[in-house]
Image (cartoon, grey):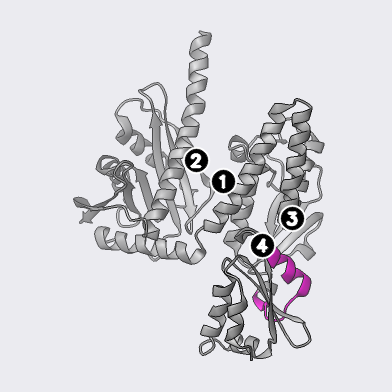
């Protein structure tokens, strides 16, 4: 059996670790932000998990490979599991549970998730398996901001939300050069293959070439891509793990149960709303969706408010009412509004009108004070209020902030677009 003293030789850095037997065969591959801390956990679980006991009994040594970030560790882990097929990575061989990232062999290749690459036709390339479904989804979500790509199985008759979010070139409606699009796909392949340093060096070379040719706009575009990749690496390292998200959602579930007497079995879907306006000329609303604590941009919605008077409360009422009228959209377990008691009361009116009090929890998050505003519900009415101050240590509070800030960003983006359009139309007249 391996000696726990081996952990002392491991660095406290991100990387991939490999348990090997006496013949140097790989038994297990794993990744960690902190190699020393992660491997130490195996020896602490000896008494409780037979699978780990057996692994430690058969293992003869531990090798490791250092990387610069958690995202690189995750990509390298998937690559090594695919290469070595370690016997103790049994869960990674379960096609029903683990995801791969695939690139289709088409005129305009699409990037998508799949479970059985060996049975999928017309694949240009595929990467994985990825132990964490949320991690590979987050990687593709962030990567799409850098290199917009197509994900639809069939070209739609008109451009979808991804095009309007600048996440897809929109080749279904607009002329897109195959060569330029495929160049982006090749860069995505390099990233998913874990060749991130090579990709950045390649981009830097392209940027310098454009600058030398006095094509400064193109050079600036590539510089922005490099910055986004570097920011992505740092952001991913800090991304909440699934366990943290579950803790945050459970904390919110307990708040709703305590103050609103609404017993939610689980908070799977959280929707956050915000209003953006400057006077009565342009008023818009936004809805963003978090599933299991993670944003789902494809389910975001924008609303051009019809009632131009009445301020934020009327706008909140209109947005949530119009949203709930879409019964084909899954209802959330929790609604968050950007604002205080006035905005929360507006949400309450709609939920009561729809007979959803007791079925959907709701609260607010005030911007300036950064306080959670929870209505205390008794017999279907707001009887009082509970105000919870800011806490940087509370995972639930941090999740609400993320959702509120995302709703605010999305509302502002739509507002600026409509405002510019309205201003242009006015000037034309």
Q: Are marks 4 and 1 in contact (CB under 8 Å)?
A: no
Name the image quarter holding residue 22.
bottom right
Q: Which residue is mark 4?
A: 67
In this rendering, position of residue 294 left or right of residue 27: left
In the rendered view, tell whether residue 264 sits above or below residue 144.
below
In the rendered structure, which disc, 4 or 1, sits on the residue that comes first in sequence? 4
In the rendered structure, which disc, 3 or 4, sits on the residue that comes first in sequence? 4
How packed is label 2: few (under 14 Cα within 10 Å), some, or many (20 or more)? some
In the rendered view, tell whether residue 39 sits above or below residue 353.
below
In the rendered view, tell whether residue 88 sits above or below residue 406.
below
Q: Which residue is mark 1?
A: 298
Magenta region: 76-91
In the rendered structure, which disc, 3 or 1, sits on the residue that comes first in sequence? 3
Identify the residue at image location x=82%, y=37%. Answer: 179
Q: CA distance from mark 3 to mark 4?
A: 11 Å
Helix, strand or loop under label 4: loop
How packed is label 1: few (under 14 Cα within 10 Å), some, or many (20 or more)? few
Q: CA distance from mark 4 to mark 2?
A: 38 Å
Q: CA distance from mark 2 to mark 3?
A: 35 Å
Judge depth for marks 3 and 1 and give the one in front. Answer: 3
**Residue 427 visible, this orientation:** yes
Judge depth for marks 4 and 2 and give the one in front. Answer: 4
Q: Position of residue 145 (x, y in %)?
A: 62, 43
Please tell me the numbered disc located at residue 333: none
Q: Which residue is mark 3?
A: 195
Identify the residue at image location x=60%, y=62%. Answer: 133
Judge depth for marks 4 and 1 and give the one in front. Answer: 4
């Amino acid at each position: 059996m391996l000696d726990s003293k081996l952990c002392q030789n491991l660095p406290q850095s991100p990387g991939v670790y490999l348990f090997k037997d006496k013949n140097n065969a790989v038994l297990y591959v794993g990744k960690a932000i902190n190699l020393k801390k992660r491997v130490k956990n195996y020896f602490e679980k000896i008494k409780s998990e037979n699978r780990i006991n057996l692994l430690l009994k058969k293992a003869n040594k531990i090798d490791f490979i250092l990387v610069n970030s958690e995202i690189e560790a995750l990509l390298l882990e998937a690559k090594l599991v695919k290469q070595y097929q370690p016997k103790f990575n049994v869960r990674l061989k379960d096609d029903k549970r683990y995801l791969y990232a695939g690139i289709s062999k088409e005129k305009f290749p699409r990037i998508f998730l799949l479970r059985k690459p060996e049975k999928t036709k017309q694949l240009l390339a595929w990467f994985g398996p990825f132990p964490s479904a949320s991690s590979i989804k987050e990687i593709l979500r962030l990567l799409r901001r850098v290199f917009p790509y197509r994900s639809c199985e069939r070209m739609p008759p008109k451009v979808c939300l991804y095009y309007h979010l600048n996440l897809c070139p929109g080749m279904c409606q607009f002329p897109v050069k195959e060569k330029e699009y495929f160049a982006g796909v090749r860069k995505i392949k390099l990233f998913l293959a874990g060749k991130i340093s090579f990709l950045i060096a390649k981009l830097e070379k392209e940027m310098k070439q454009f600058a030398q040719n006095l094509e400064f706009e193109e050079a600036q575009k590539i510089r922005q891509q490099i910055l986004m990749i570097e920011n992505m690496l740092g952001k991913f390292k800090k991304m909440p793990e699934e366990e943290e998200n579950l803790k945050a959602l459970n904390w919110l579930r307990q708040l709703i149960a305590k103050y609103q007497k609404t017993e939610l079995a689980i908070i799977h879907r959280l929707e956050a709303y915000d209003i953006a306006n400057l006077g009565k000329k342009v008023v818009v609303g936004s809805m963003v969706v978090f599933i299991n604590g993670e944003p789902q941009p494809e389910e975001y919605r924008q609303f051009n408010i019809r009632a131009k008077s009445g301020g934020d409360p009327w706008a909140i009422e209109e947005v949530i009412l119009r949203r709930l009228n879409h019964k084909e959209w899954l209802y959330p377990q929790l609604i968050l509004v950007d604002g205080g008691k006035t905005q929360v009361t507006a949400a309450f009116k709609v939920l009561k009108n729809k007979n959803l009090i007791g079925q959907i929890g709701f609260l607010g998050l005030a911007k300036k004070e950064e306080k959670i505003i929870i209505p205390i519900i008794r017999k279907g009415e707001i009887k009082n209020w509970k105000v919870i101050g800011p806490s940087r240590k509370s995972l639930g509070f941090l999740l609400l902030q993320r959702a509120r800030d995302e709703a605010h960003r999305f509302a502002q983006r739509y507002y600026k677009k409509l405002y510019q359009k309205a201003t242009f139309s006015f000037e034309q007249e």
